[in-house]
Image (tube, rainbow, N blue to C red):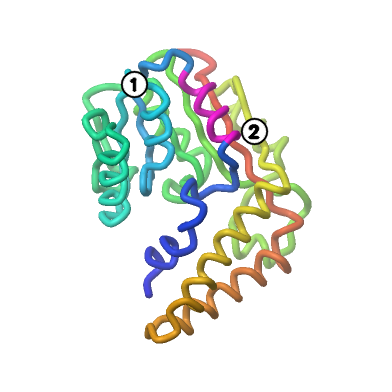
């Protein structure tokens, strides 16, 4: 079973794919979409959960999503059709970094996908290129809540603490107009959901050839979370505007 299939199973009970509960997602979208008639782009949209929620809440909204997974985009199209918002959603099967458009976007989303661009600041650079004048960016990424172990850094990457993260964002030409730091409950709920979903699938499908692999993966990931990064990793979402247009 490949990485994409593992991810699909892991997020079956947590489709937002980030440590955020429904109220946090709703508030972040409210701050990112003050008018309700914006043109929105999600760079690394997956199954389109952010876009689908935005479209359902705002009948005048138009949205586009970019992702490399055709399976995820197929599920996004099916969900959009079920919600009746498919005519206002355009999906692109390609690398997010390669996406171009003849028009800018009022909100550019990239939550939990900064790694696809090489980090937070490169992700913001990609968003800036696609942002309309006066537009906003809604971005989410990890940070170190406490001093990490060498193993945590090796596993998850070179994050900084929250204050340093904010300093770098501001120095890059952005002004935060809203933000949300995921709570311990949100962080734990996300991890339990991911590895619990994997384990449940394996236990429910013992005859499948990948069952043992999936169960082992769930146990390994759960142990890594509890032993390596649970007490050090945080997650922050920011709604940003360019300091000078």
Image height of 80 relative to 227, above or below:
above
In space, the residues marked 2 and 1 are separated at their CA atoms by 25 Å
| Secondary structure of the residue carrying numbered label 2 | strand
For disc 1, the marked residue is: 59
Q: Nearer the viewer, residue 40 or 170?
A: 40
For disc 2, the marked residue is: 180
Q: Nearer the viewer, residue 215 or 32?
A: 215
Tell me which residue sits at (60%, 75%) in the image. Answer: 220
Please report whichever mark, 2 or 1, sits nearer to the chain's N-terminal start: 1
Q: Main secondary structure of the magenta part?
A: helix
Among the 4 quarters of the image, the one containing residue 240: top right
Q: Residues within 10 Å of mark 2 (few under 14, many from 20)?
A: some
Query: Is 137 left, or right, of 152 in this rendering?
Result: left
Image height of 143 relative to 230, above or below:
above
The residue segment tinted magenta is: 23-33
Q: Position of residue 56 (x, y in %)?
A: 38, 29
Tell me which residue sits at (50%, 13%) in the image. Answer: 244
Q: Position of residue 191 (x, y in %)?
A: 61, 59
Tell me which residue sits at (76%, 56%) in the image. Answer: 231
| Secondary structure of the residue carrying numbered label 1 | loop
Decide whether residue 13 is among the magenta residues: no
| Numbered-mark total | 2
């Amino acid at each position: 079973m490949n990485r994409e299939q593992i991810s699909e199973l892991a997020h079956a009970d947590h489709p937002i794919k980030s440590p955020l509960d429904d109220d946090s997602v709703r508030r972040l979208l409210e701050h990112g979409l003050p008018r309700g008639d914006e043109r929105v782009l999600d760079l690394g949209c997956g199954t389109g959960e952010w876009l689908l929620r935005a479209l359902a809440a705002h009948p005048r909204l138009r949205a586009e999503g970019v992702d490399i997974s055709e399976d995820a985009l197929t599920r996004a199209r099916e969900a959009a059709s079920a919600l009746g918002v498919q005519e206002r959603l355009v999906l692109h099967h390609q690398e997010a970094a390669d996406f171009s458009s003849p028009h800018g976007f009022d909100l550019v989303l990239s939550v939990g996908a900064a790694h696809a661009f090489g980090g937070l600041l490169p992700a913001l650079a990609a968003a800036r290129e696609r942002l309309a004048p006066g537009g906003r960016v809604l971005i989410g990424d990890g940070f170190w809540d406490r001093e990490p172990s060498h193993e945590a850094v090796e596993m998850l990457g070179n994050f900084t603490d929250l204050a340093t993260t904010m300093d770098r964002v501001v120095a890059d030409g952005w002004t935060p107009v809203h933000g949300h730091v995921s709570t311990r409950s949100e962080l734990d709920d996300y991890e339990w959901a991911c590895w619990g979903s994997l384990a449940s699938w394996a236990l429910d499908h013992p005859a499948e050839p990948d069952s043992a692999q999936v169960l082992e993966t769930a146990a390994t990931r759960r142990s890594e979370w509890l032993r390596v990064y649970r007490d050090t990793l945080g997650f922050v979402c920011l709604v940003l505007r360019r300091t000078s247009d």
